[in-house]
Amino acid sequence: MTATQPRPRSVSIAFFCWLAAAIMLMLGGLLLVSSQLPIPAFLRGAGVLWIVSGAVLSFLAGRTRSGDTRFRRAAVALSIGLAALLALFSVTMGGLVWLIVLVLLIVATVLVLRPSAQEWYQPGDSPESDA
């Protein structure tokens, strides 16, 4: 990323999609963990997983928006993994919220991998050590 190039719109839209998905993941996880209903331990554990993954996704999305290629790759990898887990979870739970999060993750991943966004990210500009 050079200082003269403005951030592409697709990167900004991807950031807000990731942010909305992270918020929905954390809220859904909090609802699963704090429910007073007799919920199996597996679902409570999945709720903790959604909370942690939502927090990590929001962190990675913020770093991706600033132009770091390493965090973009990590956010894309986390999004693909979460998409697979959410697809399985939505089949077992049958919730529409999980499908909305799934769509947001896929949209953000596609947008950040578009050619205009890839041109904005330059691998030589990330603060990687050469050692």
Image: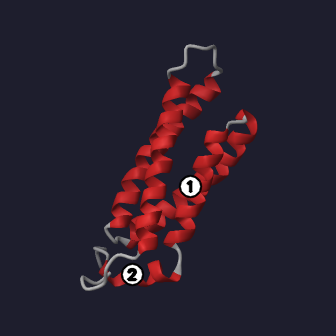
Marked residue nearer the N-terminal end (2 or 1)? 1
Amino acid at circle 2: Trp
User: Looking at the image, is 96 positioned above or below residue 3?
Assistant: above
Where residue 130 sits in the image (x, y, percent)? 30, 79
Q: In this view, does 33 lie above or below 114?
A: above
Report whether 86 appears left or right of 28. Answer: right
Choose between 124 and 102: the one closer to the eye. 102
Residue at 37% x, 53% y is 59
Q: In which quarter of the image is residue 43?
A: top right
Secondary structure beneath label 2: helix
Quarter of the rendering containing residue 35: top right
- Image quarter (top left, top right, bottom left or bottom right) of the N terminus: bottom left
Left/right placement of residue 27 relative to residue 91 reads: left
Q: Residue 57's x, y, as percent? A: 44, 52
Residue drawn at point x = 47 percent, y = 55 percent: 18
| Disc 2 from disc 1: Cα separation | 22 Å
Mark 2 residue crowding within 10 angstroms, few (<14) / some (14–19) / many (20+): some
Identify the residue position indicated by label 1 in the image. Answer: 104
Name the spot of residue 91 as percent of width and height, x first: 75, 40
